[in-house]
Image (cartoon, helix red, strand yellow):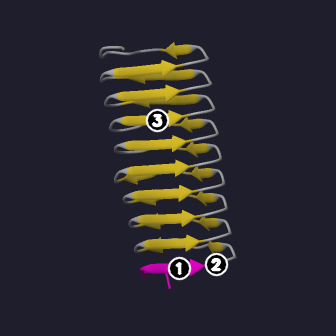
Amino acid sequence: PAKFNYKLQTTGGNINLTNSIFGKLNAETEGGNVNFDDINGNVIVNTSGGNINGENVDGDVKLHTNGGNISLGNVKKGKSEIETNGGNINIGDVASDLKAITNGGNINVGNVGGSADLLTYGGHISIQKVSGSAKMETYGGHLNLQGATGKVIAKTMGGHINLENISGSIE
């Protein structure tokens, strides 16, 4: 059924939702990937050892994996919290605030309609435009921001910083 709230758990397999959903998605797996298409509602996904791949979301998003990559289309409304302990993060456009953390990969994001708080311990960060403030921090990579209207904090311990079209203050 498309109009339904989903709460899915598995200890060793993948979770795949191949149709659009009108409702909430809460998915948890100990050892598999989570894949979903368009969700019109809030999304919470946790996996201990897999990738998370999603299309567009119209609601709040919380995605966490201990050992995989995260790929997400556009977030049309709601706040987004994205975290992986061992992979890359790729996100399309986000309509509101975004917080993304990876301990071992790159972060690539389209446009952000609110503020952006991005941290990687071992990769590069690239964002198109941020409508609010932008905080970007990496311990081993480059930073690239193509535009921001708020305050920008950009820190790297081992790479280049490229900031364009910034109308707020820069630290």
> In terms of secondary structure, where does tag 1 sit?
strand
Three-letter code, disc 2? Thr
Tell me the residue at 34%/31% (across/down): 131
> In terms of secondary structure, where does tag 3 sit?
strand
Image vertical order of residue 76 relative to residue 48, above or below: above
Q: Mark 3 packing: few (<14 Cα in 10 Å), some, or many (20+)?
A: many
Q: Which one is nearer the viewer's eye here, 80 or 105?
A: 105
User: In whole angstroms, how far apart are the C-alphas of marks 3 and 2?
Assistant: 30 Å
Mark drawn on residue 11? 2
Q: Which one is nearer the viewer's eye here, 40 or 25?
A: 25
Tell me the residue at 66%/58% (across/down): 51
Image vertical order of residue 141 relative to residue 79, above or below: above
Residue 38, percent from left and from top:
52, 64
> In terms of secondary structure, where does tag 2 sit?
loop
Residue at mark 3? 118
Q: Nearer the viewer, mark 3 or mark 2?
A: 2
Q: Quarter holding the C terminus?
A: top left
Q: Nearer the viewer, mark 2 or mark 1?
A: 2
Mark drawn on residue 105? none
Q: Mark 2 packing: few (<14 Cα in 10 Å), some, or many (20+)?
A: few
Q: What is the magenta range?
A: 1-10
Q: Quadrant of residue 28?
A: bottom right
Q: Are marks 1 and 3 in contact (CB under 8 Å)?
A: no
